[in-house]
Image (cartoon, rainbow, N blue to C red):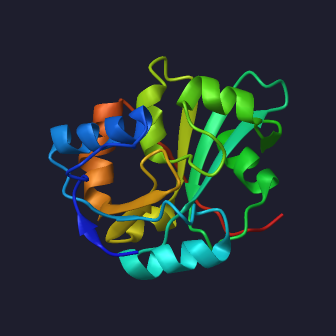
């Protein structure tokens, strides 16, 4: 793995959702770096630690959640090292009970598979059926790390670009939450 700047010059072999991410970031004028790891999808902590070291940033947890009735969906972005307690988030969002959503609505609403969810997948949610929540600690960091809707590449860009360019372009105003990992 190595640190590269911007989108790949040759997009051969990249899937459509990953290509859309690069086009989206370029269209917004978001300067970003990336590392490709096609032989090591970011599915284990060991691979994530390698990616973090190359990018010099901590890739966040991106949790796809649903309410009890499976009628409302939420994307939570939080620091990877912070414990997640559903009760804590449910209380802050005013939702009776949250649990992890299944792969089917993730694919239908965000056009991604488990392990590849990121804030950039919200570009695929044209009807804004997914609510976005971001832990306040994520927004305190200078740099933000995520996948381009595929966990065989990872990106970093300024958190200010997430806040000031990406989220407005997606039409999202996130709920900012304060998570401490308490019951």
User: Residue 99 placed where, x, y %?
Assistant: 81, 43
Please tell me which residue lies in front, 85 or 117.
Answer: 117
Q: Is residue 138 visible?
A: yes
| Residue 173 visible to an observer of this rendering | no
Taking depth in this image into account, of 88 and 159 the one nearest to the observer is 159
Question: Which residue corresponds to the image point at 27% horizontal and 58% vertical from the top-left?
Answer: 160
Q: Quadrant of the N terminus?
A: bottom left
Q: Residue at x 62, y 23 (%)?
A: 108
Is residue 27 left or right of 55 when viewed as pictured? left
Q: Position of residue 3 (x, y in %)?
A: 30, 73
Image spot of residue 50 (x, y percent):
51, 79
Up the image or down, 29 lies above or below 44; here it is: above
In the visual, does 3 lie left or right of 94?
Answer: left
Identify which residue is drawn at 63% across, 78% down: 46
Q: Residue furthest bottom?
A: 53
Residue positioned 57% across, 23% down in the render? 129
Q: Is residue 118 above or below residue 79?
A: above
Q: Total of numbered circles in the picture?
A: 0
Locate the C terminus and report the quarter of the image it occupies: bottom right
Viewer-nearest residue: 183 or 115: 115
Q: Residue furthest toward the top? A: 127
- Figure quadrant of residue 94: top right
Q: Residue furthest front?
A: 12
In the rendered image, residue 133, in percent from the top left (x then y), is placed at: 55, 46
Q: Is residue 172 above or below residue 36?
A: above
160 sits to left or right of 31: right
Quadrant of residue 158 within the rendered picture = bottom left
Looking at the image, is 178 positioned above or below residue 30? Answer: below
């Amino acid at each position: 793995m190595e640190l590269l700047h911007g989108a790949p010059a040759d997009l051969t072999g990249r899937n459509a959702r990953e290509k859309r991410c690069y086009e989206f970031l370029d269209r917004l004028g978001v300067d970003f770096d990336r590392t490709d790891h096609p032989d090591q999808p970011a599915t284990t902590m060991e691979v994530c630690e390698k990616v973090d070291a190359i990018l010099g940033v901590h890739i966040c947890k991106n949790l796809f959640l649903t309410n009890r009735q499976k009628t409302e969906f939420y994307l939570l972005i939080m620091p990877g090292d912070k414990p997640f307690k559903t009760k804590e988030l449910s209380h802050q969002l005013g939702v009776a009970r949250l649990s992890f959503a299944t792969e089917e609505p993730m694919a239908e609403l965000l056009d991604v598979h488990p392990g590849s969810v990121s804030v950039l997948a919200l570009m695929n949610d044209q009807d804004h059926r997914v609510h976005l929540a971001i832990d306040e600690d994520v927004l305190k960091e200078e740099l933000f790390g995520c996948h381009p809707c595929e966990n065989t590449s990872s990106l970093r860009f300024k958190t200010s670009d997430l806040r000031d360019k990406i989220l407005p372009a997606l039409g999202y105003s996130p709920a900012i939450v304060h998570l401490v990992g308490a019951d």
